[in-house]
Image (cartoon, grey):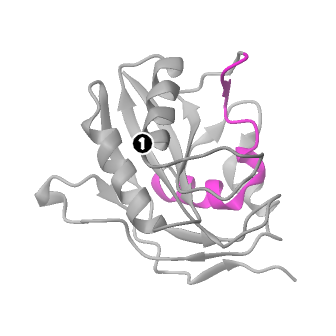
Amino acid sequence: MSTCYIGLGANVGQPREAIESAIAAIDREPGLRVCARSGLYRSEPVGAQGPDFLNAVIQIESSLTPTELLTVLQRIEHEAGRDRPYPNAPRTLDLDLLLVDELELETPKLTLPHPRMHRRAFVLQPLLDIAPDVQIPGKGDTRKLLAACSDQRMAAAGAIGPTDPSAGAPRQVPNDIAKTLYRAP
């Protein structure tokens, strides 16, 4: 089994519901199990126009290969109405395979770690919420990488779905301690 981290985001339609539905769909997939999920964060689009995004990160255990997992994630995006009319278009759902164990991989279809994750506060903060000691292979200390993103505006936006572990829910990390993490000058 591999430990994997997946970034989730949406900024059109019903973003919260899309993210919650995607987490449930991932957890239902054979060979996948959701182990932990961050809270939600609201962030401005980076390198794009449109409404603010809701973002989160989940940790899963997977018996699939990274390429098989990517295929599953793209199918879930498609089923949620994801359309790719142009680069960085607004999204009903965006699922990014961020990390698979400490694997570094570059193929025409998949690059691990995700090639831009180290420059995105909306990925790094929720990742640190659920994996405070995680290192990004080839990039280094995640906390230092997050500090370099201090110009990106991001705010806590609440929890995702049920948070009661006795109900069989994955570990939820609350993000209501700091309401605004970063603000553009």
Instruction: Say what secondary structure mark 1 lies in.
Output: helix
Q: Is residue 121 magenta?
A: yes
Residue 34 seen anywhere in this rendered image of the structure: no
- Residue 33 falls left or right of residue 140: left
Q: How many labels were placed on the picture?
A: 1
Residue 169: x and y in percent read: 22, 55
Looking at the image, can residue 110 be seen? yes
Residue farthest toward the left in the current orientation of the protein: 166
Query: Does 85 appear above or below 66?
Result: below
x then y, percent, for residue 49:
78, 66
| Residue at horizontal 82 percent and vertical 60 percent from the top | 148
> In this rendering, is residue 12 above or below 145?
below
- The span shown in magenta is 108-130
Figure quadrant of residue 25? top left
Figure quadrant of residue 99: top right
Q: Nearer the viewer, residue 54 or 152?
A: 54
Tag 1: residue type?
A: Glu
The residue where tag 1 is placed is: 79
Task: Decide if residue 41 is on the left or right side of residue 3.
Answer: right
